[in-house]
Amino acid sequence: MKIVHVASEMFPYVKTGGLADVVGSLARALARKNHEVTVFLPGYRSVLEHPEVEPLLRRTRRLRIEMGDMFMTGDVRVFSPAPNLTVHLICREEFFDRKAPYGNGERDYEDNHHRFIFFCKAVVEVMRLTNLDADVVHGHDWQTGLLPLLLRATEQRHRVNLAMHTVHTIHNLAFQGLFPMKSFYRTNLPTELMGIDGVEYYGQASMMKAGILFADRITTVSPQYAEEIQTSDYGCGLDGVVQLRADDLLGILNGIDTDTWNPATDALLPGNFSAADLGGRKLCRSELLKKAGFDPRFSGPVFGMVCRLTEQKGVQLLLANRAFFERENVRLIVLGSGDGLLEEGMQELADALPDKVYFRKVLDEKFSHLVEAGSDFFVMPSLFEPCGLNQMYSQAYGAVPIVTRVGGLIDTVTDIDDEPADGTGILIEPTAAGLAGGLERALDLRMDRAAYDAVQQRGMGRDFSWEKAAEVYDAFYEELGA
């Protein structure tokens, strides 16, 4: 089967969040199943200069892309990181030679709509010029929402068949690619698509809405999230649009890359371990405490948190529980960056409680692995969570997750009170009081060492691998008739 994935991120080449992990892991898993997999990415400078990319990179062709009433040029560069897997980079320095994919940290780039209209158009043009003839073209999030429309428009214009089926995956409905309607002319699509039955959304153009309405099938990243986005509470204003496509919507749970996230083989850890032999985990715990400036011999509960510092991730709920960390003999280690006010709040808490709280405001892949491997509990109080990966990492690494009853967290964590014989973590309501109760339950669990060990063992025994998830995608693609 020829499968094309189109995305704005792919681990290990460029990553701002879970999207990159999903695209990188799923593409490789499908390639291992002997599918012919092609991935299209923007040619960010960081990708072009990545040490795993630069030696393999070759330029294949020059592109001339129609953008409204003008043409823009770009280059295509290609590399093959694994058997059956080819990555095409769409390059144009004006759009992609920047420090970050979407913005400068304070705000999004003002020309993001032009950047990703160009990207989607270039993907379609490469497919046409190379006669790629895909069985499935699978776009991810708003950055690729125009793909189904652009594919079909190009097929009609040039009388070719570029893709048998199109799929659009919603990774996070909160990010919708909303832009001024006047920018729609850059697409060169029919003007009737500018209406309410097309891309229009309250006077703006929505790329996410385009993907939802015009892809053959829609997926999300967990079964629970597929249900939630059809409601006004979690639909982010597009719940009505999602409901229109409910029969074509499927929630497929993400997996984790067990080549990268496996405590038995993880080269980023000071000691490896497994459910059968936790000796290396003790070393990881000591090293984590040491790097955070704490006594490595500390024997009390260690709480870890790794996330983007945003309201979605519930960081404000953690800050609201300051009294717990002032009162209890525990340690809290937080890694993350994002919203300036939340960064200030975390830093103030760490400065006020230097003997209990450590905060690192630098994205650090190695340290994030150590937090998972050395913490007793992993705190993830998200207000909403389409799937989430850290709660799966934490279980694989022996840290008991404390998570909210939302989205993929419900699908991947079993509450120890709801199901005592099968519980793998602590589920809470997404409120400050809910987190307060979860932290107290964690202390109680840690006091009963046998009970804690049993929960830890059950979590480490769960199979969250992408090989399992890829089987579901295999069946899904077959159902499409590919």
Image (spheres, rainbow, N blue to C red):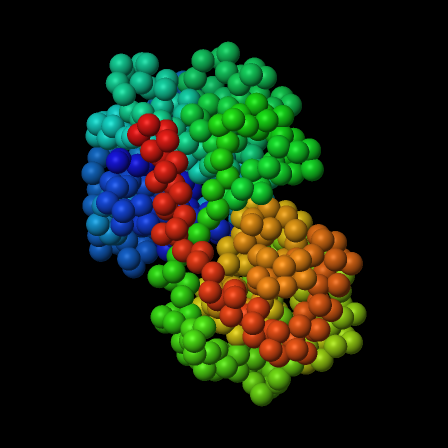
For residue 254, say whether it is visible.
Answer: yes
Q: Residue at x 71, y 68 (%)?
A: 441
> Which residue is painted at 68% across and 78% down in the image?
447
Is residue 150 or residue 108 the one in the foreground? 150
Position in image of residue 8 (x %, y %): 42, 42
- Residue 358 sits above or below residue 80 on the image: below
Q: Nearer the viewer, residue 413 or 168?
A: 413
- Percent x, y of residue 405: 66, 51
Q: Is residue 212 left or right of residue 299?
A: left
**Quadrant position of residue 404:** bottom right
Position of 176 compared to 122: left or right? right
Occupied quadrant, residue 280: bottom left
Number of residue marks:
0
Residue shown at the point (57%, 62%) measured from the top left:
422
- Pick out the residue farthest to the front: 421
Q: Percent from the top left, x then y, of residue 238? A: 61, 29
| Residue 344 appears in the rendering | no
Percent across and percent down for residue 205 are 55, 25
Q: State the residue in front, 207 or 101.
A: 207
Q: Quadrant of residue 35?
A: top left
The quarter of the picture where the N terminus appears is top left
